[in-house]
Structure formats: structure tokens, C-alpha cells
Image (cartoon, rainbow, N blue to C red):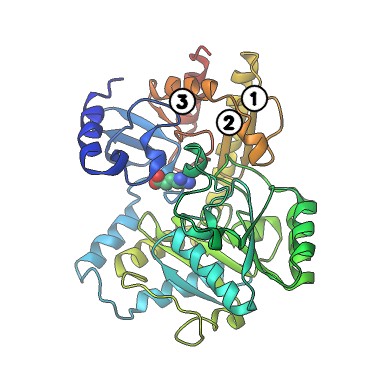
Amino acid sequence: MIYKRSSTLFAEAKQFIPGGVNSPVRAFKAVGGDPIFVKKAKGAYLYDEDGNRLIDYIASWGPLILGHAYEPVINAVIEKAKKGTSFGMPTEIETQLAKLAVSMVPNIDKIRFVNSGTEACMSAVRLARGYTGKDKIIKFAGCYHGHSDSFLIQAGSGAVTFGSPNSPGVTQGTAKDTLLAAYNDLEAVIKLAKANKGEIAAVIIEPVAGNMGCIVPTDKFIHGLRDLCTEEGILLIFDEVMTGFRLGKGGAQEVLGVDADIVTFGKVIGGGLPVGAFAARTEIMDYLAPDGPVYQAGTLSGNPLAMSAGLAMLNELNNNPQVFESLAKKTKYLHEGLDKVISDKGMEYQINRFGSMLSVHFTDEPVVDFETSAKGNNEFFKKYFHGMLAQGIYLPPSAFESYFLNDALSYEDLDDTIAALENIRF
Ligand code: HOZ
């Protein structure tokens, strides 16, 4: 496949946009080469500026769970746009989406819409601090909760891809309130809670991590966190930006059987438009302005186009919950196919999977946290990524990102993907 026009467009973009991209991981720095510029997409396929068709495994990093340009979502947005694109005033559709989301997700009574997952997590932590009257938070190395200051401490995703998990520009003052533990290490969290007794507002976690590859929590860890938070009066925040409305109707809370105190959303809840949200029980949410003292606001929050995409998407998922099973089956099929091919090649590797999230790691050790994820052989990963790309398969361009399958993928697409791997020489 030829990617000439993409390279030309990238060279031009670099003159006017830092690094040529508006989100670092898109720049392909972790895998080398020039990024692909997309012209359009439909169903499971991306069509790039050079006229290539690619089977897509990132689905815009998660939102497009039913495939690209999904008709009910597109039609809802078009109809809404004809009536105006932004008012900065309340609209009925915000309540419709709120009502539906609250009915699908366990343990939440009210939800506030924002524009991105970053905003959702940033606001959730502010709310937790205001509600508890405490300052410190605990996060996990390799978990990514967006790019607000408190979270850029051992952050996953693009931050760690570029070797800057701690960003300049985050003050010592901010950093000192973020305590760090390793994922799946309950003892470490217990120690932090004891050493900082009465000072911790919240523990924030990706309940299934997707920003250091896909990492699954052990039962002991995730249930232990819940118990610890309850005992210590700490709020447990589930960052379900990736997992919400993807692992099941009720997200990771439902699938793992653990109740969080505050839940954040993004991606699927916006159906491919910029939406984030955070939600909790009434007593916590009523701490938010205008009812409570914790301030949070935004001109484009609850934007009608974004709400219409989110509502159409959640309606589809709510009415057809078998989609989650279908996706999990397809992901298992892909996992087993890749597994067989890589093991036949005699390589050291791990494949992690949960629901419709998956990641491939070239290491002999089980990948259970950031440290074990970082041991992956990036030279093999680069060969794998470019070998697949050359055959029209678009994978996340970093070993620290998860695949997000979409239900438009056919078994033939999955077979083509597995066959493509067979052709790669490492
Ligand atoms: N690191 C983001 C996903 N985990 C990438 C988002 C993007 O580049 O669009």
C-alpha cells in the first residue's frame, strides 16, 4: 500500500500544528513513519487520503462501537444540526440522554455532561475533594485520566508512549497531592491509605485499564479497593471513559460487580462527538454548582449535536444489548487467531483481553501493571504494527494503547487480520 499523500499532508500539518497532530499518539512516534490521514470511514473500514481501505481496530479510540458513520447516529446529528448547533441554554435532549444513561448504569442518580474525558475526570476529582473536604488522591501508574495536571503523574497512553509520564508544567504543589500505586497491588494502596490517613479524597482507577495496553484487574484487587475506600471514607472513582457503555450496558461496574462512588464517561456516550460526563449518587452530585459549592461549567456542555449523537448511540445499545456479547465473541475469536499465529512463530508474547478490548505485548511475563507492560519489546511491536498496516490493518500505533473492536467487523475481517499476521517476518 502507498501512503504518499498522507506523508505530504503530514509534512504540511507539521508547519502549522505542533508535531502535525492534535493529540500526540497520532503522530506515530512510537512506531516510526508518518501517520495515515483519513478521508472518510464507514462500518469497520477507514479510507485514507491515498485511496487505501484499512480494517480499523481503534474505532476513534473507542466511541464507534457500532462502526463508523452508523446511520441512526448520523441521521440524528443531521436532523439536530438543522435546528441550530449551540445555544448555551438548557435543551430537552440533555435530560433525555441523562435519563437514559442513569437507567443503564448501576449506582448513579444524576449525571453532568462535559466535552471530553479529561474534563470529566478533572471535574470528578474536584467534586470528590469538595465533597470530602480532603486534598489527596491515589492514582495508578500507567492509568490515564486525561491531561489535566493532577493526572500527569506516571500517566499512561500518549504520555508514556513519548517517555514523559510526568509532564513539565505540572507544579510540585499539584504533584504532591497525587499519590501513586502500581495497578493490581492492593497492599500498596492500603499502605498509602494508612500513611495518609484522613487526607485522601479519592482513589481514581480505570477499572479495566486501556492506556498501558489492556490490563485486567484481579478480583482481589478491585473488590479490595472498594472495601478499603468504604472503610477509610475515601470515594472510589471509576474512570469508565473507555469501558462505559462498551463492556456492557452498565460498564465495568456491572461486569465486575463493584459499585463506584463517582463514575466518569466519554467516548461511547458521545457516539463519536465530543462528550464526557461524570455521575454519582444524588448526595454527591448535589454538591455541584448551582445546587452546591463545587464549581464546574462550560458553554458547549450538553451541546445539542453531541447529545443527539449520544442519545442515538445509547438507544441502540439499550435496545440491542446482545451487541456486547457479539463484540466479546469477535474479540475472543481474534485473540485465539492471533494467539495461534504468534505462538507458531515461537515468539514470547502475551495477549490481554477483556470484553471488546485487547492488546498484544511482546514479553514473556504476564502483563498486569505498568512495569510489566513497559517490558514489551518495542522493536517487535513496530514490525508487527507496520507489517499489519502494509496489509491494510490499522492497529493502535503504540503498545500502550488498547484495541477497540466495533461490531461492524465481520468474521471475514477478523480472518483477514489473522492471515495478515501470518505474513509478517519478525
Ligand atoms: N491517547 C489517546 C487514547 N488513549 C489518544 C487519543 C487520540 O489521539 O485521539
Element carrying mark 1: loop
161, 212: nearer the viewer? 161
Residue for badge 2: 360
Q: Tell me the quarter of the picture where residue 194 sits.
A: bottom right
Q: Residues within 10 Å of mark 1 (few under 14, many from 20)?
A: many
x, y percent for residue 286: 54, 83
Element carrying mark 3: helix
Name above or below for residue 83 compared with residue 5.
below
Determine whether, in the image, residue 271 is placed left or right of residue 321.
Answer: left
Residue for badge 3: 385
x, y percent for residue 272: 37, 54
Determine whether, in the image, residue 247 is placed left or right of residue 6.
Answer: right
Q: Residues within 10 Å of mark 2 (few under 14, many from 20)?
A: many
x, y percent for residue 274: 36, 59
Residue for badge 1: 349
* Residue shown at the point (62%, 47%) measured from the top left: 141
Residue type, label 2 = Val
105, 180: nearer the viewer? 180
Find the distance from the CA under tag 2 to the CA under tag 1.
7 Å
Residue type, label 3 = Phe
Count of marks, rendered view: 3
Residue type, label 1 = Tyr
Q: Which mark is residue 401?
A: none
Position of the N terminus by quadrant: top left
Q: Do tag 2 and tag 1 residues touch (Cβ < 8 Å)?
A: yes
Residue 285 seen in this snapshot = yes
Q: Residue furthest front?
A: 172
Q: Tell me the quarter of the picture where residue 52 sits.
A: top left
